[in-house]
Amino acid sequence: MFESAELGHKVAKEVWEKEVPALREALLDAQYDLAAAKFPVVILVAGVDGSGKSETVNTLNEWMDPRHIQTHGLDEPSDEERERPHMWRYWRMLPPKGKIGIFDGSWYTWPILERAHGRIKTSDLDQDMARVARFEQMLIHEGALVLKFWMHLGKDTQKKRLKSLEKDPKTRWRVTPRDWKHFEMYDTFRQVAERALRSTSTADSPWIVVEATDPRYQKLTVGKLLLERLRARLDNPAPRPAAAPPKPAIDLDGVNILKALDLTKRMDKKDYEEELLTLQGKLNLLTRHRNFGKHSVVMVFEGVDAAGKGGSIRRITQALDARTYRIQPVAAPTEEERAQPYLWRFWRNLPRRGRVMFFDRSWYGRVLVERVEGFCSEADWQRAYSEINDFEDQIVRSRSILLKFWLSISQEEQLRRFEERQATPFKRFKITEEDWRNREKWPAYESAICDMLDRTSTEIAPWTLVESENKYYGRIRILRTLVQRLEEEL
């Protein structure tokens, strides 16, 4: 894979001086057109040690308007980043629409290093790369242009480069013992990198291997390829990807998972109040368990309007230290959030260890309200199922305890609660015209809910279906589930 980048490519000084001014002008024009086109550009600059990655990144910032470029030089993750899923740090750094994001060090760095040092197996590397490929495909589906450059040096050339840098007092600081350690492992790194690049070089986001022997050739090649790909996208906007099968389930006999729930389950007030105090006491003790700080807790509350999501959350928070939890209500996305991939606003709100996050509605809006109301294309909500499953898989694998509750009530009970809210002055804020409009689309929402439950209730992130016709029963069911889950995990 790297042989074509070991041929001794060079660019003469006169060619450099002739071509760079025109290239810079064209890049600036394309960059300003990008601002109006409203799609993001993600550029990865990776490669062997001493291959001029940082110099190339600096040159791109010099040739274009750096005010519209977000550059990220990534090394070891911070303590805050270590306490969240591995991809959290990268999601937070994604450029918004109209901007360019350059990553010197990326989501490839850690898996390649870990495999080269033998700390993970080849099968682990392959799983990581499959996850990366899905992430990049998601970015492309969301409209991003993804460019991946691998700066390559042959073994002898890398040795000469490191010695040259080390010899010069001005650049000596750039060569570390780790660089020489990696050089000693050159053949291993080459093998691992080739495997990683081959498995993630796709038609939509191929790897571009650039020979880094001659800095002029390297920078001119990267600049020209960036211009070529960016201009091609600007002049021929990418069509929206087609929706992927399978299609929504067909209801032939009128039976579905929601209708199968027993909404007659009840609990009287006395039993409710007694068990509520008992469960809240257990929950408080569990959150002070010595192992609780090794985990975070993410709770998702979904349900039709007036199903009791807020009341259920309050019965949990009454047992918690207010400093350790946060409630994130989810409404229509802001302009900042619209400029990013759909899941971005949820990734950035994931809690660190020892903390609890409540999502009062969640990322499932894409396959519920956005599907039913037509706020996104069919292609968007069809692919959202697999993207959500992948998102939740990463949450759980980062030692987070994820619980998902669907609160179910009948149309008749919803109407009764709506009318009660309208008649109670301090509850009127809870009812809106939109709530009444949503009732008219009950069958469409029911179909979307059943599809959601069917496709996103997985072994590691199952849904808990809560019969909430009786609020007392529903609240206790949720608390029992939470306490039992924490007891199992801690």
Image (cartoon, rainbow, N blue to C red):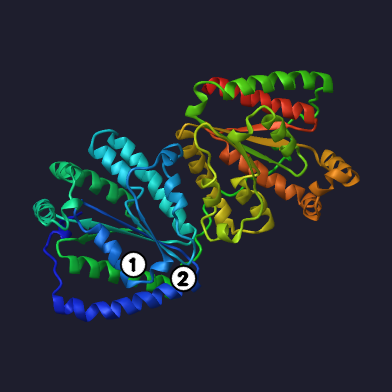
At a point 18% along the width and 65% down the height, the residue shown is 215
As measured in the structure, the alpha-carbon distance from the residue carrying label 1 to the one carrying label 2 is 25 Å
Query: Badge 1: few (under 14), some or many (20 or more) residues near its Cα, within 10 Å?
Result: some
Across the whole image, how many numbered discs are drawn on residues? 2
Q: Name the residue type under label 1.
A: Asn
Specify the quadrant of the image occupied by residue 397. Answer: top left
Q: Residue furthest front?
A: 169
Query: Badge 2: few (under 14), some or many (20 or more) residues near its Cα, within 10 Å?
Result: few
Which of the pair 135/25 is nearer the observer? 25
At a point 88% along the width and 42% down the height, the residue shown is 420
- Per the image, label 2 sits on a secondary structure element best described as loop
Asked if one can make out residue 258 in the rendered structure from this viewpoint, the answer is no
Give the left or right position of residue 36, taking residue 319 as reference.
left
At a point 80% along the width and 25% down the height, the residue shown is 266
In the displayed structure, would residue 13 be above or below residue 99? below
Residue 464 position, x and y percent, is: 64, 31
Q: Which residue is mark 1?
A: 61
Q: Name the residue type under label 2.
A: Pro
- Per the image, label 1 sits on a secondary structure element best described as helix
The answer to which of marks 1 and 2 sits earlier in the sequence is: 1
Q: Quadrant of the N terminus?
A: bottom left
Residue 289 position, x and y percent, is: 54, 21
- The circle drawn on residue 237 is 2
